[in-house]
Image (cartoon, helix red, strand yellow):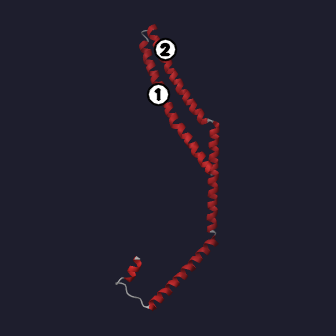
Amino acid sequence: MATRNRARSSTSKKLTSDQVAENIKEAAKKIRETSRAVRESVKTLRESGAIQEMADATHEAALTARDTTRDIRDTVKDVEKSGVVSDTAKAMDETAAAAADTARAAKDTALQLPKEAPKTRGMVKRGTRQTRREANAAGRQTKKAINRKAPKVKKKVKELGKKANVS
Protein backbone atom coordinates (compact mmCIF):
# COMPACT_ATOMS: atom_id res chain seq x y z
CA MET A 1 0.00 0.00 0.00
CA ALA A 2 2.88 2.35 0.67
CA THR A 3 3.96 1.90 -2.95
CA ARG A 4 0.55 2.99 -4.21
CA ASN A 5 0.61 6.08 -2.04
CA ARG A 6 3.99 7.08 -3.40
CA ALA A 7 2.89 6.49 -6.98
CA ARG A 8 -0.13 8.68 -6.45
CA SER A 9 1.68 11.48 -4.68
CA SER A 10 1.44 14.90 -6.19
CA THR A 11 5.20 15.19 -6.67
CA SER A 12 5.36 12.37 -9.26
CA LYS A 13 4.49 13.23 -12.85
CA LYS A 14 1.74 11.46 -14.73
CA LEU A 15 2.73 9.04 -17.45
CA THR A 16 1.19 9.04 -20.88
CA SER A 17 -0.09 5.82 -22.46
CA ASP A 18 2.94 5.79 -24.79
CA GLN A 19 5.29 5.99 -21.81
CA VAL A 20 3.43 3.17 -20.02
CA ALA A 21 3.64 0.99 -23.14
CA GLU A 22 7.34 1.77 -23.47
CA ASN A 23 7.92 0.87 -19.78
CA ILE A 24 6.10 -2.45 -20.26
CA LYS A 25 8.22 -3.24 -23.32
CA GLU A 26 11.36 -2.43 -21.36
CA ALA A 27 10.25 -4.70 -18.49
CA ALA A 28 9.54 -7.54 -20.94
CA LYS A 29 12.98 -7.06 -22.48
CA LYS A 30 14.62 -7.30 -19.01
CA ILE A 31 12.62 -10.44 -18.21
CA ARG A 32 13.82 -12.07 -21.44
CA GLU A 33 17.45 -11.08 -20.75
CA THR A 34 17.28 -12.39 -17.18
CA SER A 35 15.64 -15.61 -18.35
CA ARG A 36 18.37 -16.12 -20.92
CA ALA A 37 21.09 -15.44 -18.35
CA VAL A 38 19.55 -17.92 -15.87
CA ARG A 39 19.20 -20.56 -18.61
CA GLU A 40 22.86 -20.09 -19.57
CA SER A 41 24.00 -20.25 -15.93
CA VAL A 42 22.09 -23.48 -15.30
CA LYS A 43 23.44 -24.96 -18.53
CA THR A 44 27.01 -23.98 -17.56
CA LEU A 45 26.61 -25.42 -14.05
CA ARG A 46 25.23 -28.69 -15.41
CA GLU A 47 27.91 -29.02 -18.08
CA SER A 48 30.73 -28.12 -15.70
CA GLY A 49 29.84 -30.98 -13.38
CA ALA A 50 29.85 -28.66 -10.35
CA ILE A 51 26.46 -29.88 -9.12
CA GLN A 52 27.48 -33.54 -9.43
CA GLU A 53 30.77 -32.76 -7.71
CA MET A 54 28.88 -31.11 -4.81
CA ALA A 55 26.52 -34.10 -4.55
CA ASP A 56 29.47 -36.53 -4.52
CA ALA A 57 31.32 -34.50 -1.87
CA THR A 58 28.21 -34.36 0.33
CA HIS A 59 27.74 -38.10 -0.05
CA GLU A 60 31.36 -38.75 0.90
CA ALA A 61 31.09 -36.48 3.96
CA ALA A 62 27.94 -38.30 5.12
CA LEU A 63 29.65 -41.70 4.75
CA THR A 64 32.71 -40.47 6.63
CA ALA A 65 30.55 -39.13 9.48
CA ARG A 66 28.70 -42.45 9.66
CA ASP A 67 31.91 -44.51 9.69
CA THR A 68 33.51 -42.27 12.32
CA THR A 69 30.44 -42.54 14.54
CA ARG A 70 30.52 -46.33 14.22
CA ASP A 71 34.22 -46.40 15.12
CA ILE A 72 33.58 -44.26 18.20
CA ARG A 73 30.66 -46.47 19.21
CA ASP A 74 32.78 -49.60 18.88
CA THR A 75 35.61 -48.04 20.91
CA VAL A 76 33.20 -47.01 23.67
CA LYS A 77 31.77 -50.52 23.78
CA ASP A 78 35.28 -52.00 24.00
CA VAL A 79 36.19 -49.67 26.87
CA GLU A 80 32.93 -50.47 28.62
CA LYS A 81 33.43 -54.24 28.21
CA SER A 82 37.05 -54.10 29.37
CA GLY A 83 36.00 -52.74 32.76
CA VAL A 84 38.90 -50.28 32.90
CA VAL A 85 36.74 -47.50 34.30
CA SER A 86 35.13 -49.57 37.03
CA ASP A 87 38.45 -51.25 37.91
CA THR A 88 40.11 -47.87 38.25
CA ALA A 89 37.30 -46.57 40.47
CA LYS A 90 37.51 -49.70 42.65
CA ALA A 91 41.29 -49.35 43.00
CA MET A 92 40.84 -45.74 44.08
CA ASP A 93 38.24 -46.78 46.67
CA GLU A 94 40.54 -49.52 47.98
CA THR A 95 43.41 -47.03 48.26
CA ALA A 96 41.24 -44.68 50.30
CA ALA A 97 40.13 -47.52 52.58
CA ALA A 98 43.75 -48.67 53.07
CA ALA A 99 44.79 -45.13 53.97
CA ALA A 100 42.00 -44.95 56.56
CA ASP A 101 43.05 -48.32 58.02
CA THR A 102 46.64 -47.11 58.26
CA ALA A 103 45.52 -44.02 60.15
CA ARG A 104 43.46 -46.14 62.58
CA ALA A 105 46.36 -48.54 63.18
CA ALA A 106 48.70 -45.66 63.85
CA LYS A 107 46.22 -44.17 66.30
CA ASP A 108 45.82 -47.50 68.12
CA THR A 109 49.59 -47.83 68.37
CA ALA A 110 49.85 -44.32 69.71
CA LEU A 111 47.27 -45.08 72.40
CA GLN A 112 49.25 -48.11 73.59
CA LEU A 113 52.56 -46.30 73.89
CA PRO A 114 51.87 -43.86 76.75
CA LYS A 115 51.69 -46.68 79.29
CA GLU A 116 54.69 -48.62 78.02
CA ALA A 117 57.03 -45.87 76.90
CA PRO A 118 56.14 -42.44 78.29
CA LYS A 119 59.15 -40.72 76.70
CA THR A 120 58.29 -41.76 73.20
CA ARG A 121 54.68 -40.77 73.63
CA GLY A 122 55.23 -37.29 72.25
CA MET A 123 57.21 -38.56 69.29
CA VAL A 124 54.59 -41.16 68.40
CA LYS A 125 51.81 -38.64 68.89
CA ARG A 126 53.48 -36.29 66.41
CA GLY A 127 54.10 -39.16 64.02
CA THR A 128 50.51 -40.29 64.32
CA ARG A 129 49.26 -36.78 63.71
CA GLN A 130 51.44 -36.52 60.60
CA THR A 131 50.35 -39.95 59.38
CA ARG A 132 46.69 -39.08 59.95
CA ARG A 133 47.07 -35.84 57.99
CA GLU A 134 48.75 -37.63 55.13
CA ALA A 135 46.17 -40.43 55.14
CA ASN A 136 43.34 -37.89 55.20
CA ALA A 137 44.96 -35.94 52.38
CA ALA A 138 45.37 -39.14 50.36
CA GLY A 139 41.75 -40.01 51.03
CA ARG A 140 40.57 -36.56 49.96
CA GLN A 141 42.68 -36.67 46.83
CA THR A 142 41.36 -40.11 46.00
CA LYS A 143 37.76 -39.02 46.49
CA LYS A 144 38.34 -35.91 44.39
CA ALA A 145 39.90 -38.00 41.64
CA ILE A 146 36.99 -40.43 41.73
CA ASN A 147 34.41 -37.65 41.79
CA ARG A 148 36.22 -35.75 39.05
CA LYS A 149 37.00 -38.61 36.67
CA ALA A 150 34.38 -41.33 37.08
CA PRO A 151 31.26 -39.20 36.36
CA LYS A 152 32.95 -37.61 33.36
CA VAL A 153 33.89 -40.99 31.97
CA LYS A 154 30.40 -42.36 32.57
CA LYS A 155 28.85 -39.25 31.01
CA LYS A 156 31.16 -39.46 28.00
CA VAL A 157 30.35 -43.16 27.55
CA LYS A 158 26.63 -42.39 27.68
CA GLU A 159 26.98 -39.49 25.20
CA LEU A 160 28.98 -41.57 22.77
CA GLY A 161 26.49 -44.40 23.16
CA LYS A 162 23.62 -42.05 22.36
CA LYS A 163 25.47 -40.69 19.33
CA ALA A 164 26.20 -44.20 18.16
CA ASN A 165 22.53 -45.18 18.51
CA VAL A 166 21.41 -42.16 16.47
CA SER A 167 23.33 -43.24 13.37
Q: Position of residue 129 (x, y in %)?
A: 43, 20
Q: Amino acid at mark 2?
A: Thr
Of callouts 1 and 2, the N-terminal one: 2
Q: Amino acid at mark 1?
A: Ala
- Which residue is found at the position 50% from the left and 37% from the top? 148
Quarter of the image where one finds residue 60: bottom right
Res. 84 mark:
none
**Residue count near mark 2 (Cα–Cα under 10 Å), binned few <14, some 14–19, many ≥20:** some
Q: Report the residue that reaches farthest toward the top.
A: 116
Q: Report the residue that reaches farthest toward the left.
A: 10
- Which residue is found at the position 65% from the left and 52% from the top? 67
Between 4 and 102, the one nearer to me in the picture: 4
Q: Pick the quarter of the image with the N terminus.
A: bottom left
Mark 2 lies on residue: 109
Between 114 and 159, the one nearer to me in the picture: 159
Q: CA distance from mark 1 to mark 2?
A: 20 Å
Q: Position of residue 106 (x, y in %)?
A: 49, 17
Mark 1 lies on residue: 137
**Residue count near mark 1 (Cα–Cα under 10 Å), binned few <14, some 14–19, many ≥20:** some
In the rendered view, would you say 132 is above or below 15?
above
Q: Position of residue 100 (x, y in %)?
A: 50, 23
In the rendered structure, are the residues bearing label 1 and label 2 in contact, judged by CB atoms less than 8 Å apart? no
- Which residue is found at the position 64% from the left and 66% from the top? 52
Q: Position of residue 14 (x, y in %)?
A: 39, 88
Is label 1 in a helix, a strand or a loop? helix
